[in-house]
Image (spheres, rainbow, N blue to C red):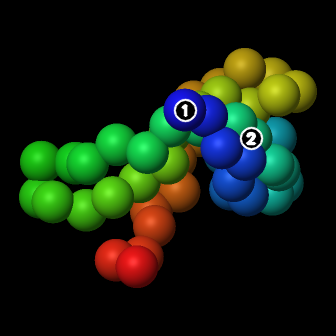
Amino acid sequence: MADSYNGYCVKCKEKRDFDGEVKVSESGRRMAQGTCPVCGTKMNRILGKA
């Protein structure tokens, strides 16, 4: 289930909307992980608990 999120692309140095999946890291934090639609770099966004 891919949703749209807004995150920062380190390679483009801009905020972009990306389609990503919610994953849980080893420390229990939720994050959206996807790829930049322009350059294809992996993007992450840490989500809140709600």
* Residue for badge 2: 18
Residue 4, percent across and down? 72, 47
Observer-nearest residue: 32 or 2? Answer: 2
* Residue for badge 1: 1
From the viewer's perspective, is 42 left or right of 23?
right
The residue under the point 65% across, 28% down is 35
Q: Secondary structure at mark 1?
A: loop
Amino acid on which the number 1 mark rests in the picture: Met
Amino acid on which the number 2 mark rests in the picture: Phe
Instruction: Rate crowding at label 2 as few (under 14), some (14 to 19) or many (20 or more) other CA atoms within 10 Å.
Output: many
* Numbered tag placed on residue 35 in the rendering: none
Q: Quadrant of the N terminus?
A: top right
Relative to 34, say whether 13 is above or below.
below
Q: Residue furthest top?
A: 40
Q: Is residue 9 visible from the viewing direction of this image? A: no
| In this view, the mark in front (1 or 2) | 1
Which mark sits nearer the N-terminus, 1 or 2? 1
Between the C-alphas of marks 1 and 2, the distance is: 13 Å
Q: Quadrant of the C terminus?
A: bottom left
